Image: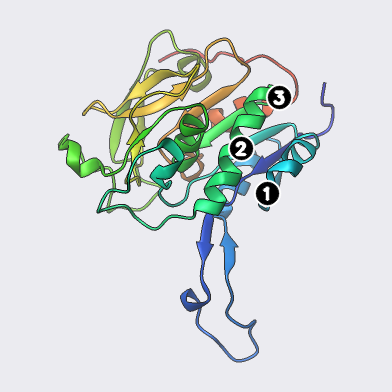
Amino acid sequence: MVSQPPLVGVSTSEVRSAGDRELVAQGEPPRTELALGERYLEALRAAGAIPVILAPVGTEAIDSLLGRLDAVCLSGGPDLHPSAYGVLPHPELGPTEPELDRFELELARAAVTRGLPVLGICRGMQVLNVALGGSLHQHLPDLDGGLNHRQECISGEPSHRVTLARASRLTKVIGRRYVEVNSFHHQALHALGRGLAVAGRSPDGIVEAVEAPGRRFTFGVQWHAECLVDRPEHLSLFRGLVRAARGHEVAPRMVA
């Protein structure tokens, strides 16, 4: 059982090319960089963890990497390349990073196999699903559900509601069945990965949350919860991850 603040590894899947950065006097030269929003780190620190930013490593080193961590948070980022689930690219597929995809997919599989607590956020939920054999809708507008899943308001403002399954463990973690969320995704879950169950949907039926019944803390949410931790129900996700990383069971909150 972890007595000190647990170490939670956070994946970094956004790549910025040298051309994305302006050369300024006295500054570093433009180069390819990995980027991670600070809100993930702030949310994990607020929940009592020490966040560890994960640099991609070869698949042979992933077990060694995970052996030093108490939990994993799979962060948001670009579209997953559909070769990861065996289909051809859609014409509207966004930018992809297949090398980072391979690392994160193996990271997710290995974390689940080891029984580490896992929280997938936005792309991170999609990575978790594909890592376990699932697939994705590549272009949500094709489904014509009538709901805009790429909101125009700021990330700290919710844009639609998610209804959680009454009997889901996620409902116990969050403490309510109806949760207001933000939305910034282009893809969404199609076929579910092995061992995953739907834990929540948006009003147009899109899968917005999944969980792995019978496993240790293993959840995915399609919204960017790290940008909403000023709301207790979203902070509870990170607190639940940290509690599980300390070796405790999920502590249910009163369901509203």
Q: Which mark is residue 54?
A: 1
The residue to which callout 3 is attached is 114
| Quadrant into which the C terminus falls | top left
Residue 113: x and y, percent?
Answer: 66, 23
**Mark 2 Cα shell of 10 Å, populated few (<14), some (14-19), many (≥20):** many
Whether residues under marks 1 and 2 lie with C-beta atoms below 8 angstroms apart, the answer is no
Q: Secondary structure at mark 2?
A: helix
Compute the Cα span from label 3 to label 2. Answer: 12 Å
Q: Earlier in the sequence, mark 3 or mark 2?
A: 2
**Mark 3 Cα shell of 10 Å, populated few (<14), some (14-19), many (≥20):** few
Q: In the image, which is nearer the foreground, mark 3 or mark 2?
A: 2
Q: In the image, which is nearer the foreground, mark 3 or mark 1?
A: 3
**251 or 145: nearer the viewer:** 145
The residue to which callout 2 is attached is 106
Residue 176: x and y, percent?
Answer: 42, 18
Image position of 25 with respect to 161: above or below = below
**177 or 122: nearer the viewer:** 122
Q: Earlier in the sequence, mark 1 or mark 2?
A: 1
Q: Secondary structure at mark 3?
A: helix
Tell me where residue 2 sits by quadrant. Answer: top right
Q: Earlier in the sequence, mark 3 or mark 1?
A: 1
Compute the Cα span from label 3 to label 1. Answer: 17 Å
Inspect the image, locate mark 1, and give the three-letter code of the amino acid beneath it.
Answer: Leu
- The residue at the point 25 percent across, 53 percent down is 91
Inspect the image, locate mark 3, and give the three-letter code of the amino acid beneath it.
Answer: Arg
Q: Quick check: can you spot residue 13?
A: no
Q: Which mark is residue 230?
A: none
- The residue at the point 74 percent across, 42 percent down is 60
